[in-house]
Image (spheres, rainbow, N blue to C red):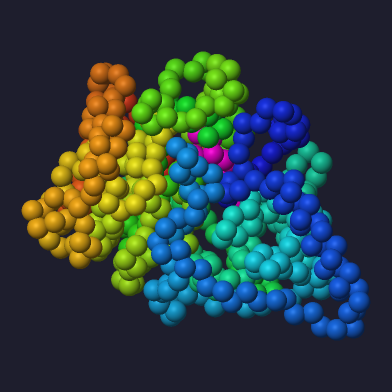
Amino acid sequence: MVILYNDQQQKRRSKKIRWACIHPFPITEEQEERKHKLWAKTMIELTNKMNEVWIPPINNNRIDQNGESTSCELQNNEKYNQNDILEEENVDEDDLPELSEVPSNNTFVPVQDEHGYLLCRNGDWIIDRFKIIKQIGDGVFSKVHLVSDSKNLQRSANGENPSKRALKIVRNVQAYKDAALQEISVLQALHSFDDEEENGLGPSHLVIKLLDNFEYFDHICLLFEPYGLSVFDFLRGNDYHPYPLDQIRYIAYQLILAVNFIHEKGIVHTDLKPENILFVNTDNYEFKNRWDKPYEEMGLVKSKRSRNRRRIRVLKDASIRLIDFGSAVFEHQGHDETVTTRHYRAPEIILKNGWSFPCDIWSIGCILFELYSGCALFPKMDDIKHLATIERICGAVPKSMKRASSCGFYRNNNQLNCSQEVKEHVKEHTRKLFDYIKLKEMEHIQFFDLLENMLVIDPDLRITLKVAREHDFFEKLDNNLRLKAENGENINENGAT
């Protein structure tokens, strides 16, 4: 993920009140100090061994998270910020691209830390082409740097200058390198041709485009255009104040088109969530008075800043890009049993009944509810409590799905095997889906009708994206925005429209 700050924004970030959040993880002062200490220690060691050939250490530890996402910052005290990555990736090696080592003649000596991250400083060069401006993202999977690309120049008032790009440098850990190779394979397949589908649901511009990729001292590097904040980060920056319904409508329409595009290419994303949806540009916004608050039973902890803030930021252009295809799979490939971050995981995945394209549609429904409410519909919880919450909100799990499951979550009488305490907690903290409607107006009712169809428990009965696109909720979508979403007309990748 890439975030660009102009000079004025950089000054604002240095003030006491900061609203913008860098995804996946901001760099703390303590982390920065540890980084510099490690650099100093490494440079001393290298000075003492000037005549020796330095070989970067390799971390061969594989990561096994058993399908559970790792928590980094909690929303409802239980929020996540990364993918589920299993120890055994079921990937067809024949489908993955081969990357050749790119030599470098510059003076930057590559160093990686004990966790497999490549350590880079501002001003360092990567393969004599990319000059690092600053680090803009730090996650479990990789680190993202804003770089200037000396190979591609762009015209400005001061002449031609190197264009800015986002360079994602993946950790030198085999599980993450496998995921990176899978992402490269998927993105190359998606953009191998950008023709429109006959049904008009194939706008490739809504899916992030891979500009280049290479391997640099055992680190896989992916090059992208820089974009703005994620949908989740912008929501968090507004203290989880919900999005305007008109913007939800536009975001939903784009998301439906983007996911249908990848489905038409035979690819299941498997990790749709607000973090993986970027706004094209988040510099252009206006302030508006607060008009809503989160549901009381979902109990978001409000800071003093949140209580005192009477105005929130509303984007003038809510155009999006779908990103992060490291967990995406081709339909013909083998499927892991557990995929998708917990909050957006479909019931067929929890029950281990097998999954396919409909699991992405369930995730879209969960995402749209979160934009409407400011809260996750299904916070992080174990499987039993998750199923109990699903049944409370969306209705009973069909008997056929219970019988097909080998997890033993249901007794012989088809009742969920959970304690009375769990039942009472779920009943106290959740409602039926339609009871979350805030206004009994037609557009709100239409929105929840769309959600209800996306959150059908049986995947065979869940709404398809082609049908969802024609839902009544999108009747009020501005025609210019509709054309912009479908055809990408008048879209500048840097955010101008």
Q: Residue at x 75, y 80 (%)?
A: 55
Q: Is residue 133 above or below residue 249?
A: below
Q: Residue at x 54, y 49 (%)?
A: 72
The image shows a total of numbered marks equal to: 0
The residue closer to the viewer here, 313 or 482, is 313
367 relative position to 495: left or right: left
Where residue 472 appears, x then y in whole percent?
24, 31
Q: Is residue 187 above or below residue 29?
A: below
Where residue 95 appears, x then y in whole percent?
43, 76
Q: Residue furthest left?
A: 413
The residue closer to the viewer here, 259 or 431, is 431
Q: Is residue 259 above or below residue 232?
A: below
Residue 251 seen anywhere in this rendered image of the structure:
yes
Toward which corner of the image does residue 431 lie, by quadrant?
A: top left
Toward which corner of the image does residue 149 lie, by quadrant?
A: bottom right
Q: Is residue 486 magenta?
A: no
Where residue 485 appears, x then y in whole percent?
41, 40
Q: Residue furthest bottom?
A: 52
The residue closer to the viewer here, 351 or 251, is 351
354 relative position to 224: left or right: left
The residue closer to the viewer here, 464 or 199, is 464
Where residue 202 appears, x then y in whole percent?
36, 51
Q: Is residue 375 above or below residue 199?
A: above
Q: Residue at x 56, y 74 (%)?
A: 61
Residue 465 seen anywhere in this rendered image of the structure:
no
Q: Which residues are magenta?
A: 225-235
Q: Residue at x 58, y 35 (%)?
A: 282
Q: Quadrant of the C terminus?
A: top right
